[in-house]
Every structure is written in C-alpha cells, then in structure tokens.
Image (tube, helix red, strand yellow):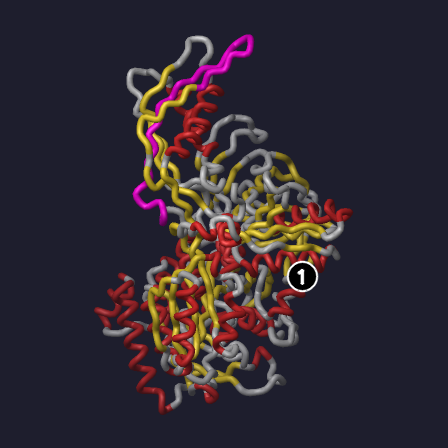
Amino acid sequence: MRNPTHTNPLATVRNLGILAHVDAGKTTVTERILYATGTTHQRGEVHDGTTVTDFDPQERDRGITIFAAAVSCTWDGHRINLIDTPGHVDFADEVERSLRVLDGAVAVFDAVAGVEPQSESVWRQADRHGVPRIAFVNKMDRAGAELDAAVASIRARLHPVPLVVQLPIGAEDAFTGVVDLVRLRALTWTEGDAVDAAEAAHEGSVPDGLREEAHRRRRLLEEAVAELHPGALEEFCATGTLDAGTLAAALRDLTRSGEGVVVLCGSAYRNRGVEPLLDAVLAYLPSPLDVPPVRGTHDGDGDDGDGDERERERDADPAAPLAALAFKVNATATGRLTYLRLYSGTIEKGDTVWDATARRTERIGRILRVRADRHAPLDRAVAGDIVAVVGLKSARAGSTLCAPSAPLVLEPPGVAEPVVSVAVEARRGADTGRLASALARLVEEDPSLVVRTDRETGQTVLSGMGELHLEVAVEKIRREQGLAVDVGRPRIGYRETVGRGVSGFVYRHVKQDGGAGQFAHVVLDVEPLDTPDSAESGSGSGSVFEFRSAVVGGRVPQEYVRAVEAGCRDALAEGPSGGHPVTGLRVTLTDGATHVKDSSEAAFRTAGRFGLRDALRACATVLLEPVAEVTVTVPEDAVGGVLGDLAARRGRVTGSDTRTGGAAGTATVTATVPLAELFGYATRLRSRTRGRGTFTARPTGYAPAPEPSPASASGSASASASGSAR
C-alpha cells in the first residue's frame, strides 16, 4: 500500500512509538523494522543480546527494555523516527515522556495472551495524549495463537473499534502470510535468513481455500467502516460496497481521529508481516502536518520583553519561530546528549536558543540523527524532526527550547510520584562525593527518580517507581562509576490523612522582640475530603488539599488569606503521626484578626503553618499506604497456594480467570495488595509455582494502613510500617 509523492517534506515524516506489555515483542518488531528498511544488515535478537535498541548492558543481561531508545530509518521515501519504549510498569515514566512527543504509535499484542495488564496501561497513557494507534498482533506462529481471540480482548478491555485489515494464512507453525483485506491480495513469506529483506514478501492472489472467508471479512470491514465514517457510508449506501481507495482513506481518517484502530498481524521473530506494518504506518498514522499545532504559553520575559503570558500556537513550519521540547537526557562523563522534538522552526549547528524553562540562553554544539547508541551528524534539523543535540548545559527532560525573539513554554511531560525508596551510601567514606555526583546524574536523566537527604537520620534516600526501577538505578552507578554502594531495605512513601476533623481551632501568632512585631490570629476548620483514601493516584502528582475562606466583613484581608493558604500547604509536608506528607483534607479559614502595625503576609503564613500543624494534632489521623493492582498468572494447580500467599500479604482478590487456547491450564488472579508486602514476592511466587508463575504490579493509589498491635508497636513491624517513625 504505497502513498503518492508529497510536495511538502514534512508529509513524509512519521514520529512513531512501539508500545506493549513485557515480552509481547516490541524490541523484536523494532529490530525487524530496522532490518526491513535496510538500516541494519543483521537481525538483532533479544535472547542473543544483539539488538540495536536494547544496547545498555543491563537491558541485554535482563532481556527487557529499560530505557526508551530512538532510532531513525527510511521506508518508501518516508523517514520514520521510531522510539522503542519499555514494557515494564516500573519504567512507565519513560513511556510517558516518549508519548508526549510522538504523533502515532504501534501497539503490539501477543497473539496468545491478547491484552495483558501493561498493554492496558500504555494504551491508557496513549489515550491521555491523544496519540493515534494501529495494533499489531504478534507471535502468530506460536501454539495457541488466535487473531480473533486477541481482537476480542482488544475490544473488551481497551474499548476501541478494532478494524481488522488482514486474514492470517495458516496457523501456529504453519503461519506463512496474510490476506490484505483492503486490496484482496495475499502476502506470503519464505523461510530462511538468506532471503533478502526487500524480497521477503511475495504478493499473489488469495488462496482458493480462503477466498470465501476473505470476502466475508472484507464485507464486515466495510460495514464497520461505513458505520463510523460519513463519506464511506455515502458510497456504501450508493453502491453496496467500498472500493480500495475509499476504504483506505476512511481507515486513515478513523485512525487519526481515534474512532477506530486498524489491526494487523504477523510474526516479527520470523520476519513475517513487517513490510505490511510499515506500509500501514505510512498509510494510516499522521505526519507532523496532520496533528494539531502545538500549544504553549507565551513567555513575556524573553528577549522581546513585552511581559505578557498568553496561549500561543505554533504550526509545523520550518520557517516559523523555533519551538522544541526536550524529552530525554543522557548525562555521561564526557558530556550531555539531549533528545529534542522540534514542533516548529529550524535549528542549525552553532545556533543560540532560549531555554524557556531554565530562563537562559544555550548554544547548539552539534546535531545528531539518532540510531540508539550510534549517531550521524547533521547540519540542521527542522520542524517534525526528532534529533539529539550536544552542548546544552541546563536543559532537562521537559525543558522548552525556543527562538530568543519568540519565547514560548510548552507543557512538559507529567512526572509520576515515586512510591518506593531505598537508603544508599558509599561503602567508603571517601566516595561520598562521587556518589552524590552519580545520583545527581541519574536524576538528571530520569525525572521519576528523586534523591533527598532524610533530615532526621542523615541518610541519602533514593526514591523511584518500583523495586526493579531502583535496582537498575543502583546497578548503573556500580557499573558506570565503579562505586561500591550499600543499599538499605526499600521504604514506602506513606501518607497521612484526617479521619475526624476539628472545628473552630484558634491559633494566635504573636512575636515582639524589638522593632516591628508579628501578629496574626486565625480560626480554622479541618475536615476530611469525601474520599481521602482513593483521592491520590499512584501516578499522580502532588497532595490532595482544598482550602476555603469563609471570613466575612474583611476581618482578614485577601492578601493575608492567600498567605494563610500558603502556610497551610507548608504544613502538609509532615503529618503528626509519622512525619509523612498529609493528603485528603479540607481547611476552611472561618475567622481571624489583624493588628494595624504588626500584621503582615509573613505573620499570617506562619500562623497558617503552625495553626494547621497544631490542628492536625487535635484531629484523628489515619496512616495511608500505597497499594498496587497485582495480576498473577499461574498454573491452575498452584492457584490455591497463590491465593493463600496473597491473603497473607493482606491482598484483596478482585478477580480471577481461567485462560483457554494456547494458555490452557493457567489461571489469572487479580488482587489489590499493599506495596510494602510485595518486596520479595517474585522469589516467593517462583518458589510456589516451580518457576512457572509470573506477575505484574501497577500502583493504583492509597488505602488506610492497619493499626500496629500493642505487642509490635515498638518492634520491627512498627519500624517497617512507618520507615521514619518520629
């Protein structure tokens, strides 16, 4: 399916992401795309550690994608900038940053397992960013592979309208090709590594045994498209059918609007179905010209100095002022590599740009076309490009680079809130400074990692999205810096909330030590929000807090009300029970008083902070712990033991299912489990299932933690429950 020649070069660009659950075959699909496009001349294999995109030593050792890797290739006169994203939930923030700059995506599904837990998570992430997708059902050569079952799971769990455009030829080991339902032609592939990539697909007529089924499915496809697309409906009603051109155009419109999802199938490992997938990327997914103009806030503090802030749009035009978003940073001992998506304008080597986030000018040293860990120099990059640049000193993931004469701030990618922590320290005291530098470089590369110093214990605490996330980060320090690092048991990011509030709490702040004094009088009501235990998502950002003012008669001026609110927010950093952040409460300022000379914003901010702190001590507070949705896949004969183990870990089972087809004899159990109880669960699960059980965990929010028993209040259970008891 070839596209016509385009006059605008941007129409021949596709910025594409590969999304999927762990082991669905994302990296293999990427490797086969590079091979089919002639970018590589050898098929990289995950199990051999020879892939282009999984180039990090840890990725090759573990056999999973950890870091989003960008590659660039060409197909049929089009440039494809492709990002292979991680599939493990601990690295969902890498997916989030990638989706922020992509125009389209290919969602890869296992033909046996269908939609898996992380498939659903990355699909929802793409929904939030409005990224059009096509689906590729992979591993059609596996025992138990069934396209219709995989499509049914896509419809049931992800809720799009799947538009299946291919019919498999053969099943399992006998899978040899597909019937293209749009053109009603068969594509088959021959066996063997010696087959040249450009000649691997053989086009012919539909096999006699599949002709009737192909026409039936083509009819179903036409009917589904006509229901969704007005232009196709008009032709369908007039002629009773859709020609190939109308059908392809309607599929493109439905894909880009998100009303439908084109579904293809194949076996990436055996190099079957990759060329039609590439054709579908060009035919259905948008170019930079097809997506809405990027929107940002005009930053009036740039060189033009007009001092205003208004929302602006920038078209994908190389002649427009520059607007680019940094979405990834690689900080090495030899320099920083910053990955950019250019939305408008042009950059050339040696250009001076304005970092609107850091509010400083930067100079572009070099521009590079990226192929994972290899790079090709460029003289310039234009709107629609994804490139890497060398020379930026201050840019971080989420920074906006723009023309100094036309400053603009683009919305940065969202950053997930860490939920698991470990204490790290250098084994040798002389290495403390080197460890601090290594941790700073880690945080620079991965914004979802947070480093802080515990004020009470003096420990350096590294926080992230999961146990594996932190394990990978620490191992990176050991390997790249040669540092011996000791790691303490992971600690959990607990929260506190209000179970029962107080009304009319009075706090007076009076200070007189010569000169102007400080006076502030506030009266506060503190109450819980409606659903404090579920208000904060595991991937959210910031506390759930509501402040109101019910002061009448001007007893507290408005500027002082804002100061009280700021002080209350300051008090949320540490709760009265264990010093954890406070969430899920509403504070109402009901009354107050001022002094004609001694009242000030500083005084009322202090009153708000200490007043809420004391009010929280008078409330009944509840400790909240992070919980995760755990999906466990085990043999049927091990379900009883797994359920018992989940119950012992305070898990609440929410569903179970017995799989059929190729996964017969296995069961899937879904449960909500406190994150604190999941440490070491992988080893325990392997032991109970003789290595046949697997699980995934996805943080979902917070729930009330149980009260410690009197017998254990001073023991290890209490210590592990709070992590930083005060």
Which residue extends farthest front? 711
Q: Position of residue 201 (x, y in %)?
A: 52, 81
User: Which residue sits at x=47%, y=48%?
Assistant: 494
- Observer-nearest residue: 171 or 94? 94
Q: Which residue type does callout 1 highlight?
A: Asp
> Is residue 102 shown above or below 147?
above
> Is residue 726 shown above or below 522?
below
> Is residue 516 shown above or below 219?
above
Q: Is residue 511 magenta?
A: yes
- Observer-nearest residue: 550 or 254? 550
- Observer-nearest residue: 702 or 217? 702
Query: Does residue 112 show up?
Result: no
* Image quarter (top left, top right, bottom left or bottom right) of the N terminus: bottom left
Which residue extends farthest bottom? 208
Q: Is residue 148 magenta?
A: no
For numbered disc 1, what is the local secondary structure? loop
Packing grade of label 1 (10 A; few <14, some 14-19, many >=20) is: few
User: Which residue sits at x=59%, y=70%?
Assistant: 63
Q: Which residue is mark 1?
A: 373
> Is residue 22 shown above or below 700?
below
Q: Position of residue 48 (x, y in %)?
A: 64, 76
The quarter of the displayed image where residue 385 is located: bottom right
Q: Position of residue 265 (x, y in %)?
A: 44, 76
Query: Does residue 71 show up?
Result: yes
Which residue extends farthest left? 237
Q: Position of residue 72 (x, y in %)?
A: 60, 62
Q: Which residues are magenta?
A: 509-534
Tally the numbered discs.
Answer: 1
